[in-house]
Image (spheres, grey):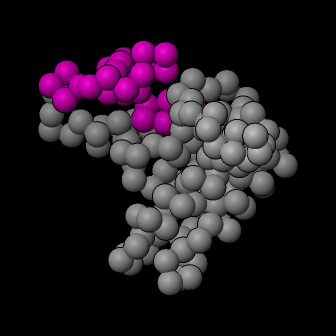
Amino acid sequence: MNAAIEKMLTRHAIRRFRPEQISEAELQQVPETGLYAPSAENNQESRLVVCQNAELNEKLGRINRFMQFKGQNPAAVAHAISAEQPSIQDDFSILSGYYGAPTVIPRFTRDSKYRCEDAAMMGENMLLAAHFPGLGACYVGRARLARVINS
């Protein structure tokens, strides 16, 4: 089987992260693949922000989690995601929507017709780029434009 196909078939969400940062080479490579993702009408208007500030990532992760359940009882909207790697939908004691990841890469797009598709293409490129060298990654859908990575 082609190595690229194998990586696509074996990639899965990781929600448990080690505290150490990824290497500088990995840090450069993963976002770069996102920037080379296709975009509708070749607008190339999406942007990435790499954040490795643990305190800021924790604050933003808590806001992300809050927005998921805003005005609702978490228990009332719960549904099983993963017993092996629980999400905030499974385990209400998880207070950060970024799961404590030391590296967070939000994607920002302009208000265009295909902004969600553009952001998703960037995210998929970065998820695969993280998986090839063995990094864990998770696309954080409820943030719509954010995901997290770490080794």
Question: Hey, which quadrant is residue 88 in on the image?
Answer: top left
In terms of depth relative to the viewer, which is nearer, 74 or 134?
134
On-image quarter of the N terminus:
top right
In terms of depth relative to the viewer, which is nearer, 7 or 147?
7
Residue 42 position, x and y percent, is: 56, 82
Residue 103 position, x and y percent, is: 64, 41
- Residue at the extreme front of the image, as rendered: 1
Residue 2 position, x and y percent, is: 77, 45
- Residue at the extreme right of the image, as rendered: 25
Question: Hey, which quadrant is residue 21 in on the image?
Answer: top right
Who's the residue at 69% across and 40% down the image?
A: 7
What secondary structure is the magenta-colored segment mainly? loop
36, above or below 143, in the image: below
> Is residue 82 found inside the magenta-colored segment of the image?
yes
In terms of depth relative to the viewer, which is nearer, 146 or 122?
122
On-image quarter of the C terminus:
top right
Residue 51 in view of the camera = no
Magenta range: 74-102
> Is residue 28 found inside the magenta-colored segment of the image?
no
Residue 14 in view of the camera = yes
Residue 122 position, x and y percent, is: 57, 60
Q: Is residue 140 left or right of residue 55?
A: left
In terms of depth relative to the viewer, which is nearer, 87 or 102?
87
Question: Hey, which quadrant is residue 23 in on the image?
Answer: top right
Q: Is residue 70 left or right of residue 147?
A: left
Who's the residue at 57% across and 23% down the image?
A: 16
Who's the residue at 15% across and 34% down the image?
A: 72
29, above or below 89, in the image: below
